[in-house]
Amino acid sequence: MLVLSEEQTRSALAWPALIDAIATMFAGDCVMPVRHHHDMEVPGESDATLLLMPAWLPGDYMGVKMVTVFPDNATRALPAIFGTYLLSSGKTGEMLAVIDGGELTARRTAATSALAARYLARMDAEELLVCGTGRLSLNLIQAHAEGRALKRICIWGRDRDKAERIANEGRALGLEIGTVTDLEAAARTADIISCGTLSSTPLIKGEWLKPGAHLDLVGGFKPDMREADDTAIRRAEVFVDTRAGAMKEAGDIVQPLKSGLLAEAAIRAELSELVRGTRPGRRNDDDITLFKSVGAALEDLAGAILAYESARGRPA
């Protein structure tokens, strides 16, 4: 049985291969129950969350990810998210690999956003704004920069020092990244805005979005979380990773559905339909598009299989 550390997992999940693996999985026949989502009390602190995400390819591979989210870990200089992925044979049930779940989650989340942007962002998009300074931020920058000629990359965060640290890490990788303090000004000029935060109140206002902008919302994973306001929902063509997940868990979708601002039928497509070509993505250059991702277990399975096979040096 393989055990892949954070660094080994990262090395096994090159961006182009990961984006393509996720696309293949969305177009395929993966079985994916809606994930288990449990709130857990932490005395004297914000509630934590336990997520269990199973998926399988019949007769091929099966896996489950366990993720914990402890929002107050920042006070302990610890990541908010920890996770482990268990990959098994879909033929025998034999355990094949234990994979670092935090790195797998960060990379597959960012890769899924980049995959969606293939269909939803303008082809000539060249300015990226990333909101948030957590683990996802640099991954989102790297994934969106893969295969796209970005000329300006900016990062915004409530903590300027954290934003600068992420920018420096990106510069060390050869990416030209700047930090911004005026979120509105940066959002008004951005072609792609990617939000990876744990915000419970909207950060991005719809009135800031220019014609042709693409808004990528990946941080909020609970009904009480919001990264964009109602005006953004009203102005945008709305897409999701999966309807089952987004309409149950994502505050940016659940709240507008509940208020009547957004109709279920107005969700233009989920990612599998975009990948398969059964529904269109962006239709013209002036459309404002919005992609809401809450994470899908098939994304983890795609990444886990890729990591396992890459680490072994050949397909299983």
Image: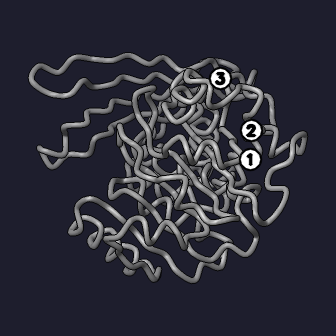
What is the CA distance from the residue labelled 1 to the residue labelled 2? 5 Å
Quadrant assignment for the C terminus: top right
Q: Is residue 179 above or below residue 25?
A: below
Element carrying mark 1:
helix
Q: Is residue 164 left or right of residue 7?
A: left
Figure colour scheme: one colour
Q: Quadrant of residue 245?
A: top right
Disc assigned to residue 244: 3
Q: Is residue 141 above or below residue 114?
A: below
Q: Is disc 2 in contact with disc 3, using a CB cutoff of under 8 Å? A: no
Q: Quadrant of residue 12?
A: bottom right
Q: Is residue 290 above or below residue 81?
A: below
- Callout 1: 10 Å neighbours few (<14), some, many (20+)? many
Which residue position holds label 2? 26
Element carrying mark 3:
helix
Element carrying mark 2:
helix
Position of residue 16 measured from the top left corner of the image (x, y, whole percent): 66, 62
Which residue type does callout 1 highlight? Ala
Which residue type does callout 3 highlight? Ala
Which residue type does callout 2 highlight? Phe
Q: Is disc 1 in contact with disc 2, using a CB cutoff of under 8 Å? A: yes
- Callout 2: 10 Å neighbours few (<14), some, many (20+)? many
- Callout 3: 10 Å neighbours few (<14), some, many (20+)? some
Marks 1 and 3, the one that precedes in the sequence: 1
Which residue position holds label 1? 23
Q: Residue at x 60, y 52 (%)?
A: 113
